[in-house]
Image (tube, rainbow, N blue to C red):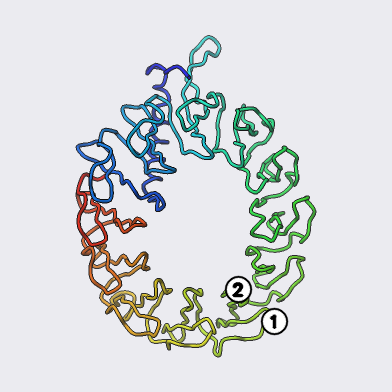
Amino acid sequence: MVKPIHKNRILSCLVFFVAILASCMDNALTAQNHEETNLYPIRHKGKEGFIDATGRIVIKPKFDHVSDFSEGLAVVEKKWKWAVIDKTGKYVIKPQPNLLFNSSEGFISIMVCMAVKENGTRHGRIKYGYYDKTGKIAIEPQFDDAESFSEGLANVKINDKWGFIDTTGKLVIEPQFDMAGIFYNGFAKIKQNTKYGLIDKSGKIVIPPLYDQVSVYYELNEGLINVCVNGKKGFMDTTGKIVIEPQFDNFTYFKDGYAIVKIDNKYGLIDTTGKYVIVPKYDDERYFSDSLLSVKKDNKWEIIDRSENPVTQSKYDEIGFFDEGYAFVKNNKKYGFINEACELVIPPQFDEADDFSEGLACVRIGDWKTGKWGFIDTTGRIVIEPQFDMAGFFYDGFAEIIQNSKRGVIDKTGNFILEPKYYEIHQYKNGIFLVYGEEHLYYFDKTGKIIWKGEQR
């Protein structure tokens, strides 16, 4: 175990610590972990702790800062000491003057300001290492930078070069790269002399660093890897062989063996060999459904199949994305909806419309300054009268609305769960709402009952 570092040795690092801590805590809050919703962070009398969904304090407010729980653990800080706790409040890693980061694959990365002697003068130097989830140092702090483990390896920096270690801390790929990303599907992106390539987990260079950009998400491209040369994009296989020469200005990922490409400001469709299925000639193009495309030409949109046969009966000024069996269409400044057979089922009649969610779509009646938003069902019948300045999607039976610049929440009947009088609302997966008012932070349950009222974090 690393010995604690005396306070006067870490003063030069405190500003850096503060910035990192604020970033970690803010990211945890704004993300609102929807998967782990058993405990919720609170602040009371200047200290932070956790409550459950009934508002009962489970972990007493005694910390200066806490993060949300992730994988059953939360990072907490008190008087410049960081620790990791479980959901009972028990320390998994006891408080210490080492900054703790998020965890992955059973390891928690840490940052330590260590005292080193250079030219007869002592300095504070940031070093990175790893704890395991029992609170023991698994890999001593020794790296100039370090990232999370991925596929059993972690990218670490030594003397301005990046390499990879295994879970024992052994260097398995020597530091030699100007940049190295995490492993994904057996490959990691590397950078040398401003150019990018790919390596495998043995450190073998699969794609030499000769390209302006490469992508490791090859499974989205039917086993092909995107590369970019002089601003033009193409594809190669996992052996480094060019399959489709870099020639496109842009592209989408392959879907069912086809990708939309852009060249000279026109859009077309290719297969995995690079052969044109649709020669670039459209002003815009996007996927509509598995086998259909929305295309734009001469300022009009229509839906076609891959043989360029028209599927819609009419052309439109705008066509939305297909969602829950419907997509909005716009003609003559009015919005309606087509179904999955591309039949017009709700004639254009609304001044604006958005996608369906949980069987309802928000629509606006009136202009964008004075008009009001409400909701229709799949027949086009208004089920919640237009009355809101803005309205969002339904999620787990609730939608956020805005009236007079204040936010509230309604259910699918249009009844207010939370009256529009708040500044910010976050919805957890199980119907708990985190709400910011003028002075206080609240938690509400899905009936609108306050389960906690306290200080803002």
Secondary structure state at the residue bearing disc 1: loop
Residue plotted at (37% across, 57% down) = 429
Residue under label 1, please give it. Answer: 307
Quarter holding residue 359: bottom left
Tally of numbered tags:
2
Position above or below: 432 against 146: below
Judge by depth and name the residue closer to the eye, 284 or 379.
379
- Determine the residue positioned at 46% across, 39% down: 102
- Identify the mark at residue 290; answer none if there is no mark: 2
Query: Is 120 rendered above or below residue 419?
Result: above
Can residue 261 be seen here? The reply is: no
Q: Secondary structure at mark 2?
A: loop
What whole-number distance in Å separates the C-alpha atoms at marks 1 and 2? 14 Å
Can you see residue 382? yes
* Horizontal side of residue 452 vs 175, given as left or right: left
Locate residue 320 relative to residue 184 in the image: left or right: left
Kindly identify the amino acid type of the residue bearing the numbered disc 1: Ser
